[in-house]
Image (cartoon, rainbow, N blue to C red):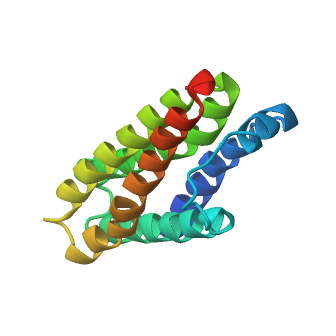
Amino acid sequence: MIKSWMIIGAVAFLVASAANLITPSDRQWFKRLQRPRWLTFEAAIPLIWTVIFICGAWSAYIVWEHNPGTSTTELMMGLYLLLEIFTIAYTPVMFRLRSLKVGTILGATGFIICVLVTLAVLPISGWAALLLVPYLLWSPIGTYTTWLMSKLNPEDA
């Protein structure tokens, strides 16, 4: 029998692989953009998001195992999937459209979805909700940074 954590991990991996749908010219576009002076930790951002995704997958696992096979659990897994899709879409969509405004909108939308998922998860498991806190803390920082970059790079907003 396939375990819930295997399905969650496989789906998370498949969705996350869409982040690689960027070209070298997309990367060059992003690298040339001005950044806020205080953004000195950019190299750590992939590690930060890796931790956030692990926490999100763990949260989904807790919710799945709380009441497996029910329509409520399936709906919750759909919400987790929606959150991951919006989160992963940030990079390839923003890069492809070369629009920091689109990145800001995707970042803000991901945050709103995470708030809704957290509120929906809270009655099921406090631990599952707590595991979404890293997303809730980091996402506004990333969204604000993207918004600020659009002000520093108006031609790429």
Q: Residue at x 29, y 44 (%)?
A: 112
**In this view, 79 is above or below 141:** above
Q: Horizontal placement of 13 versus 144: left or right?
A: right
Percent of width and height locating residue 109: 36, 38
Which quadrant would residue 58 be assigned to in this image? Answer: bottom left
Outermost residue on the bottom side: it is 127
Outermost residue on the left side: it is 123
**In this view, 88 is above or below 156:** below
Percent of width and height locating residue 79: 34, 46
Residue 3 appears in the figure: no
Percent of width and height locating residue 102: 50, 28
Q: Residue at x 76, y 40 (%)?
A: 32
Q: Residue at x 56, y 37 (%)?
A: 152
Quadrant where the image shows the C terminus: top right
Front residue of 65/59: it is 59
Q: Horizontal placement of 132 versus 101: left or right?
A: left
